[in-house]
């Protein structure tokens, strides 16, 4: 079953269960996927859905940090609930050891010489880690190694 089909099935289930919060999040994801599908003029694949989910998760994480700075803990709680629903559709996240293993392989093959090679390393590891790891964490680990 594709992620798109899973979203549709979960949307129907949420409607039947009258779970308004979950339904709202799933509808938002479906709308974002449809918009991306139209804008990119490509088929809806699991990769496209994962890209949209990753963007939505990043937006929620940014919102949570901003809401915490403003002391709006009511909004923090709502956003965390949305984040939990979004995380259901993401593949299992890699541990830091697994991320480091992928980085080790990239560093052995590319032999970067300094911070100027950051782009080369990111280009190498992004396809392997996209959706499976927080790319902000990956970026900071690479900078740490290059620095």
Image (cartoon, rainbow, N blue to C red):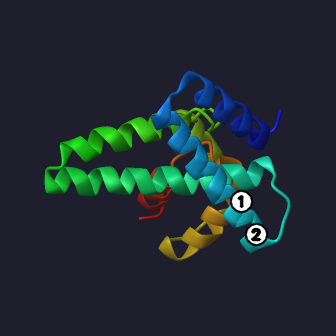
| Residue bearing the label numbered 2 | 38
Residue 17 visible in the snapshot: yes
Residue 98 in percent (x, y) is at 59, 36
Q: Residue furthest left?
A: 71
Q: Residue furthest top?
A: 17
Which quarter of the rendered picture does the N terminus lie within?
A: top right
Residue 119, label in figure? none
Q: Secondary structure at mark 1?
A: helix
Q: Secondary structure at mark 2?
A: helix
Q: Identify which residue is drawn at 62% across, 58% down.
A: 32
Q: Identify which residue is drawn at 48% across, 72% down.
A: 115
Q: Identify which residue is drawn at 56% across, 22% down.
A: 17
Circle 2/circle 1 CB separation < 8 Å: yes
Residue 138 in percent (x, y) is at 51, 52
Residue 43 in percent (x, y) is at 85, 60
Which quarter of the rendered picture does the C terminus lie within?
A: bottom left
Q: How many marks?
A: 2
Q: Is residue 10 left or right of residue 46?
A: left
Residue 130 visible in the snapshot: no
| Residue bearing the label numbered 1 | 34
Q: Identify which residue is drawn at 74% across, 40% down.
A: 3
């Amino acid at each position: 079953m594709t992620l798109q089909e899973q979203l549709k099935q979960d949307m129907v289930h949420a409607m039947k269960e009258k779970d308004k919060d979950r339904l709202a999040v799933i509808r938002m994801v479906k709308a974002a996927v449809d918009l991306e599908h139209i804008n990119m003029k490509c088929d809806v694949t699991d990769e496209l859905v994962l890209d949209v989910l990753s963007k939505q998760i990043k937006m929620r994480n940014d919102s949570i940090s901003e809401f915490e700075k403003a002391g709006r803990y009511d909004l923090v709680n709502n956003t965390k609930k949305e984040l939990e629903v979004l995380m259901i559709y993401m593949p299992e996240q890699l541990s830091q050891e697994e991320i480091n293993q992928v980085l080790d392989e990239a560093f052995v093959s590319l032999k970067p010489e300094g911070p100027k090679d950051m782009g080369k390393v990111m280009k190498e590891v992004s396809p392997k880690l996209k959706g499976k790891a927080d790319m902000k964490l990956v970026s900071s680990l690479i900078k740490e190694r290059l620095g």
